[in-house]
Amino acid sequence: MEFFAFLGPDRESQIRFMLKAASVGDLNLFKRLANDLNEEGDLAKTVASSKCSDGRTALHFAALGGRTHILKYLIDELKLDIDVKDDEGSTPLHCAIQEKHFPTVIYLLEMGANVNAMNEEGVTPLHCAALEGSKKLLELLISKGAVVDSNPDYGTPLQRAAAEGKKVSIKVLLNNHANPNIVSSHTFCPLVLSIINGSIECVKLLLKAGADPNSNSKEGTPLDVAVSKEDIPVIKCLLSAGADPNVTNEGGLTAIEVAAILDNRDAVMTLFPFASPVASFPDWTVDGIMAHIHSKEAEKVREQKLQESFLQLKSKGKEAVKKGDFHGAINYYTKAITCKPGDATMYSNRSFCFAHLNEGHKALVDAMRCAMLRPDWPKAFYRVGMAFMLLKDFDNAADAFLNGWKLDPKNKDLESALREAVQAQLRTN
């Protein structure tokens, strides 16, 4: 990564070296370079405005290097903003925690750094500490008022720790009342994340803290995920904690059926004592299940179940949209896509929901998938155009609307949208 922008051969070189001086902790050199740059007579303003290509200031570089004495000069003497953000929204506190500079973190907190500052991705200092697996950083931040379940929409610190298998972080967060059953619209619950990561120790910690072994997400129940990963120890752990093997997934299949489809005899044997017989299986034994699962009769039943589930999810998604519950609708449409990955309508519907939540990039991804699946469908190009409009990319929006209008010249929605996109182009240009 190139950290420094060269906007001019002399001044920008000085900025580059000044920031480097902050990073390595050479205060005398830093002061000399800062004074050389100070042409307007306002040293604090000069230092504050001197940034690298990603918006990081001297405070960020001093924090990354753990140079507390540089920070003291910048904050105590120059009175610079302790919570200044770079282009990604990270503060010096984020930076110090990422590099585990404990004394620097203590100083920043003592000087009033915002312990709950969020960057553009919704990451707080506590998220950073959780990812580093640092017990003392986590405890320090929580003692200073860090919100334990911060940013549930994009993942709490516990969810981030579970996804990375950070046992120490999980233990500290749970001891400080982190919610083990937190539900997010953009990620899975902590238990499922730990199973995906493959950490049985983290799974046990979460179950002991009250994580629901029967929670349901777009990936199914924790047991569904464990069976899909063919993780026998985790399957046994979940069954011991009360996981119900008779719950069906979005395709209408129980865990033991999924295990059989995967030809995982060990998993079938593990689940068998807990599973209720499935009516369509003529011989409910381990051998009978393994023999029947790939038969034409079983495949026909699975296709029928899949179609029924798809139609139910599609209907539930439509009802959620009517109620204005776009997060819920996205969940239903995502599950419907799992049943029928090639259904363009579901991508169109989910793109519509993302657009209503002002998530332009996700709306565009689904709209593009829709257009790829059905290049002859005018509505697909309408969705693409609307996503580009949300992203203020009016040129591509106009192209998309035009392509859709060519397929259906009588479509008033496309005609109106094309006109609006062209007007936006003219205003922008």
Image: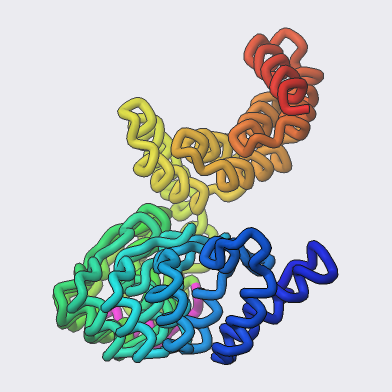
Question: Could you tell me which residue is drawn at 71 percent across and 76 percent down?
Answer: 16
Q: Quadrant of residue 212?
A: bottom left
What residue is at 41 percent from the left and 73 percent from the top? 75
Name which residue lies at 40% across and 81% down: 72
Answer with the quarter of the image where residue 126 lies: bottom left
Magenta-colored stretch includes residue 429? no
Left or right of 237 in this view: 252: right
Position of residue 85 relative to residue 303, above or below, is below
Q: Nearer the viewer, residue 363 or 391?
A: 391
The residue stretch that appears in magenta:
262-273
Drawn side of residue 287 relative to residue 276, left or right: right
Q: Is residue 247 visible?
A: no
User: Given the current orientation, which residue lies at the most extreme right position?
Assistant: 9
At a point 43% along the width and 37% down the height, the residue shown is 314
411 relative to 210, above or below: above
Looking at the figure, which quarter contains the N terminus?
bottom right
Q: Within the magenta stretch, is there residue 270?
A: yes
Query: Which of the 4 image quadrants contains residue 254?
Result: bottom left
405 or 375, nearer to the observer = 405
Q: How many marks?
A: 0
Residue closest to the eye, 417 or 128: 128
- The image position of residue 159, as x and y in percent, is 34, 71
Q: Which x, y percent locates residue 191?
A: 30, 73
The C terminus, quarter of image = top right
Q: Position of residue 235 (x, y in %)?
A: 31, 82
Please name whichever residue, 137 or 375, is drawn nearer the observer in this view of the structure: 137
Query: Majority secondary structure of the magenta segment?
Result: helix
- The answer to whether one can see residue 37 in this image is yes
Q: Is residue 352 left or right of residue 252?
A: right
Check the image and report above or below for 134 versus 335.
below
Q: Residue 417: give x, y in percent of width and height.
A: 66, 18
Figure coloring: rainbow
